[in-house]
Image (tube, grey):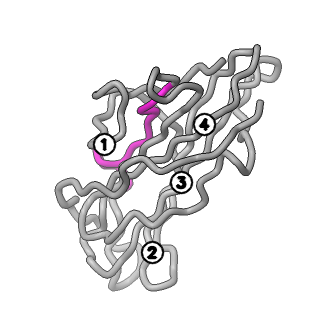
Amino acid sequence: MHVGRWRETAAGASLLAASVLCAATPGLAAAPTKSSELWATVDLCNTPHHPDTIGIRGSMPGDGHAHDRMYMRFLVQNFDVSTHKWNNVGPSADSGFVQVGSAALARQAGRSFEFKPTATTYTLRGLVEFQWHHNSHTTRSLTLPTTGGHTSLAGAEPAGFSAATCALP
C-alpha cells in the first residue's frame, strides 16, 4: 500500500466549553477524558469528490484554561488479515502533532490522507493521539481508535458520515 499526500480538512471548530474535572497537577485542571466530546472517527471514505481518500476527525474537550493548548495527531492504520492486527501505514500517513487551539473550549480537527489505488482492497482506520499542554509540559495524553456515531462540525462527506473503518481499493 502506498499513501500519497495528506491535506487538512476544516480544523479547530469550537464546541461548548467542557466541564473541568479534578486537577492532575496542583494548580492545573485536568482535561476530561471521559467526555462525550472526546472521540475519533472516519468522516470521509473514498467518495466521488475525494476518491482513494480517508478522512479522520477528532474531538477533544478543553480543560477550561485559555492559556493551555491542545494538540492532535492523526494516523492511518491498516488491518492485516494474516495476523488480525492493526498496523500503522507509515510516515506518509501520520500528520504529526497539530495544534488545534486553546484549551478553553472543546475542539474538533481533522486530516485527510489520499492513497494511490491498488488491485487489493484495504481496511483502514484512524488513530488520534490527543495531548493537553500547559506551558511546554504535556499534562494529559490519550490515544483513541476511530469509532462511528459521532457528529463532525466540518469535513464529513457525505454530511453526517461517521464510521469506525474505511475500505479502500
Which of discs 2 and 1 lies nearer the camera? The answer is 1
Left or right of residue 169, residue 112 in this image: left
Q: Nearer the viewer, mark 3 or mark 4?
A: 4
Earlier sequence position, callout 1 versus callout 3: 3
Q: State yes or no: discs 4 and 1 in contact (Cβ < 8 Å).
A: no
For the point 60% across and 36% down, the residue is: 114
Indicate the quadrant where residue 16 lies.
bottom left
Residue where numbered disc 4 is placed: 114
- Label 1, secondary structure: give it: loop
Tell me which label, 2 or 1, sits earlier in the chain: 2
**Residue holding disc 3:** 129
Q: Quadrant of the C terminus?
A: top right
Is disc 2 surrounded by few (<14), some (14 to 19) or many (20+) residues within 10 Å? Answer: some
- Label 4 vs label 1: CA separation? 18 Å
Instruction: Determine the CA span between mark 2 and mark 1.
Output: 25 Å
Q: Amino acid at mark 2?
A: His
User: Residue 154: which numbered mark, if any?
Assistant: 1
Compared to residue 140, the image places residue 156 above or below, namely above
Tell me where the magenta segment starts and ends, as one range.
33-45
Note whether 56 is above or below 31 in the view shown.
Answer: above
Q: Is residue 90 above or below residue 117?
A: below
